[in-house]
């Protein structure tokens, strides 16, 4: 059923940015629901502007709509004003393209990018009129699935999902749709669908696993209860990026979104091996796109979208073997039409600065470096292969090239951090600033240099060497922020920091077990939505929710766990072995670096052997080395 | 990091201005003016129009637009000037641009003009709006007619403008030139002609509010669909399209 468009128009006149709720974008796909076998609704549990900036959503939309037997549409979390208006006027969650109710779809697929969006998932299910708990869904309800980086610990949201895809989706989503299509034609019960889905590699059906606990809250056992359920569930991984679909007809929104530009993913994965970084573990191995393929795609994307900026995206764009060549060729070809190239996530080195200079030529926006920790000792602990000299060299190079504003990312509360490390942050920032003064003066630039220090708090993440580590207690993090606030003062210095309560909740949900499902539900019922937004985050309500469920958040957030403990996500495998993570955790404490396997030797993390993949790094044009 | 290539210190010399009259309806009526500008730019890129670029490190297609339309108001007569490097055949160029526009945006008519044509923002002084009354549409025609007569009989109509400098009261009565009611249409529609542009401006939502007030109905019981039907320059006391 389609929603009442007249009623919608009426409420749209009274909400902020109604353009987010009407669809009609360039390259959006319209298909009749009568002509397809499977109807998929991709749901992003945050605003339109954030959701539309997410590449994964765009890839899946493209892959699914390429098929004649499938329609794929989109829906986003309505902002609070719209959410209330819809609830009050009885308009359910709907798809932007056809304005069909979410309930009309066969499959509702959520993208889980950050833990603080979990209450929005429940809000969207509630608004859709779909039971929030998987166990309460009837035979005719849509199949509710999820994917994204959060699902490497799927347990906190396990109760709400019928099935969860672990890993990369562009191939698996088609298999899921195929299974659904066959099942739909078979008229067998829903249980049969779930059993068939559990047989698709990468698919986790939470209801097929039973978790039992010790009295202290630790996990006693995670046990499959259905013969179809694998243990562990291994992540899906695309072997060769050049062999899978990539969207060239990207949907071009009618309004400005967060990343409002064309995106080309130049490689996936990162093996630098920072020990706090989940992306660096779960997206292994590195797989690069062939440069000729990248250029061809870039052409096609620019042609079909009309964007005037293209971003060569990856976890660390300067690491792409052909970054210079691809960026250079794109500029040579399109610069006279005012098209620019952007490179997100640069490394702390002068190569990156040179690259930025070449790509950027005249225009000067800020540059960002991420040393992450203030002393060499701590940078060795986290395996961030960056030295003080690297930073100063990169900064010198940047200032002498005319940049006057640099941003430095650091993390506080990292395992083993002491006051020395905080002092190191202060010293590095001040040294960068005085380097700026010197270089700008030397270059004859009148402008005063600016250094912004952005400090986040360490959050232990599943499948990283630091997964057993506690987050520091709130008071300790606050004290460390206070130290930095006290010492990072003065002309040209700026400090920004993250809300400690939000980081704490993120830690709790990141390491949460299935028991947190009831807490998330209680938090939603108390009105928690858009928890990632400072303006909407209500820590008190979350604490009430923990209390009402009689669960101590500190157990998940602030407790050191033992390597021998069964972790809530032990039945989920990203290919990186627990032995490797334990070994890395030990090396961390000894301050021993582990080199990147792209350049050094194999560190034996287990991904390649376990998932039968290999790193794909391109050497010459169109050639590749693959070990 | 984000960047553009070699800075264009001089903008390119345009050969002509392509003045387009176009619609902004359907989903696109919810676009802000900035959204609209961006969308026309991207459409022009997709259509591969030979637009000229502005100067600076962040060059953009050189275009200018008729006065901003408020979010939620449709239009069947927006004007855009695109400065072109070389003249184009209007028909095939229109076809290409139409194919590159999202739904709701469509060229009505267009002309090639000299590059030094006076800007739209300078010449446009008058707008006409149609306000369709939905909701309790059974409201009797007489109520609407009486309400409109009452408005026209007033000497002054003060509305509030919130500006960065504070709240200001503006008398819009002298800026309303004509209001008439089409009682034969269903829903009933009201046509209004009023000042638009830098020398005096009546906002369509002010107009709607004044009419609803005069009809003595609650704002949320009636839905007004507003459409900008025309934008005009005045030549010798007559209203003409800005060609």
Image: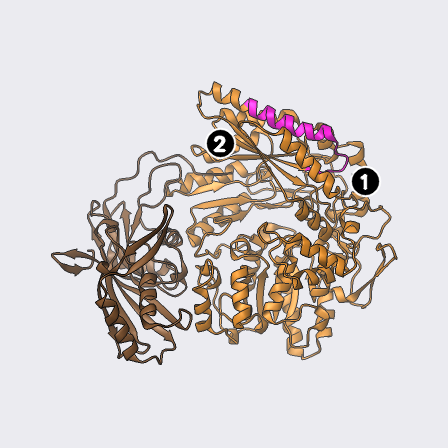
Q: Is residue A526 above or below residue A268?
A: below
- Image coordinates for residue A168, horizontal then vertical, percent: 65, 55
Nearer to the camera, B27 or B68: B68
Q: Chain of mark 1?
A: A
- Image coordinates for residue A415, horizontal then vertical, percent: 76, 38
Identify by letter the chain in orange: A
The number of numbered discs placed on residues in the rendered structure image is 2
Name, please, the residue furthest toward the front: B155
Q: Which mark is residue A357?
A: 2
- Image coordinates for residue A605, horizontal then vertical, percent: 76, 43
- Confirm whether residue A151 shows in the render: no
Identify by letter the chain in brown: B
Q: Which residue is mark 1?
A: A583
Q: Which mark is residue A548?
A: none
The residues colored magenta run: A412-435
Label 2: how many Cα within 10 Å (few below 14, some 14–19, many 20+): many
Q: Secondary structure of the magenta portion, mostly?
A: helix
């Amino acid at each position: 059923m389609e929603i009442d468009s007249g009623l919608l128009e009426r409420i749209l006149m009274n909400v902020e940015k109604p353009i987010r709720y009407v669809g009609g974008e360039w390259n959006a796909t319209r298909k009749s629901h009568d002509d397809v076998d499977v109807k998929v609704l991709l749901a992003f549990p945050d605003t339109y502007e954030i959701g539309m900036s997410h590449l994964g959503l765009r890839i899946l939309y493209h892959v699914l709509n390429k098929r004649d037997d499938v329609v794929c549409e989109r829906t986003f979390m309505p902002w609070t004003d719209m959410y209330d208006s819809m609830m009050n006027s009885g308009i359910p969650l709907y798809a932007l393209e056809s304005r069909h109710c979410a309930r009309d779809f066969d499959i509702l697929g959520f993208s889980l990018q950050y833990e603080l969006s979990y209450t929005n998932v429940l809000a969207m299910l509630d608004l859709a009129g779909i039971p929030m708990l998987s166990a309460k869904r009837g035979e005719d309800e849509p199949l509710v699935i999820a994917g994204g980086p959060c699902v490497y610990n799927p347990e906190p949201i396990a109760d709400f999902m019928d099935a969860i895809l672990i890993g990369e989706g562009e191939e698996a989503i088609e298999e899921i749709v195929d299974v659904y299509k066959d099942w739909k034609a078979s008229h067998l019960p829903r249980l049969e669908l779930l059993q068939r889905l559990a047989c698709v590699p990468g698919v986790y059906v939470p209801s097929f696993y039973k978790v039992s606990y010790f009295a202290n809250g630790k996990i006693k056992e995670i046990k499959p209860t259905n013969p179809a359920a694998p243990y562990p569930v291994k992540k899906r991984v695309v072997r060769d990026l050049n062999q899978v679909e990539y969207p060239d007809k990207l949907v071009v929104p009618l309004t400005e979104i967060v990343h409002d530009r064309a995106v080309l993913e130049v490689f996936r994965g990162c093996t630098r091996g920072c020990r706090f970084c989940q992306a660096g573990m779960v997206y292994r191995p590195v797989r690069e796109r062939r440069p000729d393929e990248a250029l061809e795609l870039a052409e096609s994307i620019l042609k079909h979208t009309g964007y005037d900026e293209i971003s060569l995206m990856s976890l660390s764009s300067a690491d792409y073997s052909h970054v210079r060549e691809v960026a250079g060729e794109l500029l040579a070809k399109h610069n006279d039409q005012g098209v620019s190239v952007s490179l997100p996530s640069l490394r702390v080195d002068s190569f990156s600065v040179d690259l930025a200079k070449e790509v950027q030529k005249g225009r000067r926006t800020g540059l960002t470096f991420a040393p992450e920790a203030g002393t060499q000792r701590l940078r060795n602990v986290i395996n961030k292969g960056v030295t003080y000299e690297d930073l100063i060299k990169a900064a010198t190079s940047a200032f002498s090239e005319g940049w006057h504003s640099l941003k430095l990312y650091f993390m506080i509360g990292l395992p083993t951090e002491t006051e020395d490390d905080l002092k190191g942050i202060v010293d590095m920032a001040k040294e960068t600033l005085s380097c700026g003064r010197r270089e700008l003066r030397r270059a004859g630039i009148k402008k005063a240099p600016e250094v912004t220090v952005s400090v986040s708090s360490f959050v232990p993440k599943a499948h990283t060497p630091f997964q057993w580590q506690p987050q520091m207690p709130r008071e300790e993090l606050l004290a460390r922020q206070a130290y930095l606030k006290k010492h990072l003062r003065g002309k040209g210095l700026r400090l920004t920091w993250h809300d400690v309560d939000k980081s704490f909740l993120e830690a709790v949900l990141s390491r949460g077990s299935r028991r947190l499902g009831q807490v998330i539900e209680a938090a939603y019922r108390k009105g928690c939505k858009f928890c990632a937004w400072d303006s909407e985050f209500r820590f008190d309500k979350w604490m009430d929710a923990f209390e009402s469920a009689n669960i101590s958040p500190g157990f998940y957030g602030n407790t050191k766990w033992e390597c021998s403990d069964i972790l809530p996500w032990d039945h989920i495998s990203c290919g990186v072995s627990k032995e490797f993570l334990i070994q890395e955790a030990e090396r961390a404490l000894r301050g021993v670096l582990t080199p990147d396997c792209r350049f050094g030797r194999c560190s034996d993390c287990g991904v390649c052997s376990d998932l039968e993949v290999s790193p794909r790094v391109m050497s010459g044009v169109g050639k590749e080395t693959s070990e | 990091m984000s960047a553009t290539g070699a800075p264009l210190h001089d903008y390119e010399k345009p050969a002509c201005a392509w003045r387009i009259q176009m619609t902004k309806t359907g989903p696109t009526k919810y676009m802000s003016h900035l959204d609209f500008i961006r969308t026309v730019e991207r459409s022009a890129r997709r259509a591969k129009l030979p637009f000229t670029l502005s100067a600076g490190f962040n060059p953009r297609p050189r275009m200018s637009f008729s006065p901003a339309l408020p979010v939620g108001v449709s239009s069947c007569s927006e004007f855009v000037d695109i400065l072109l490097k070389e003249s184009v055949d209007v028909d095939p160029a229109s076809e290409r641009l139409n194919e590159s526009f999202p739904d709701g945006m469509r060229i009505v008519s267009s002309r090639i003009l000299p590059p030094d044509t006076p800007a739209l923002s300078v010449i446009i002084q008058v707008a006409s709006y149609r306000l369709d009354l939905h909701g309790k549409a059974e409201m009797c025609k007489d109520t609407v007619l009486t309400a409109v007569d009452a408005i026209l009989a007033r000497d002054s109509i003060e509305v509030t403008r919130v500006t960065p400098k504070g709240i200001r009261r503006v008398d819009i009565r002298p800026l309303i030139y004509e209001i008439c009611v089409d009682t034969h249409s269903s829903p009933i529609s009201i046509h209004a002609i009023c000042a638009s542009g830098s020398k005096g401006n009546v906002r369509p939502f002010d107009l709607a509010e004044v009419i609803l007030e005069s009809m003595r109905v609650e704002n949320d019981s009636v839905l007004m669909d507003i459409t900008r039907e025309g934008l005009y320059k005045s030549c010798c006391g007559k209203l003409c399209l800005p060609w």
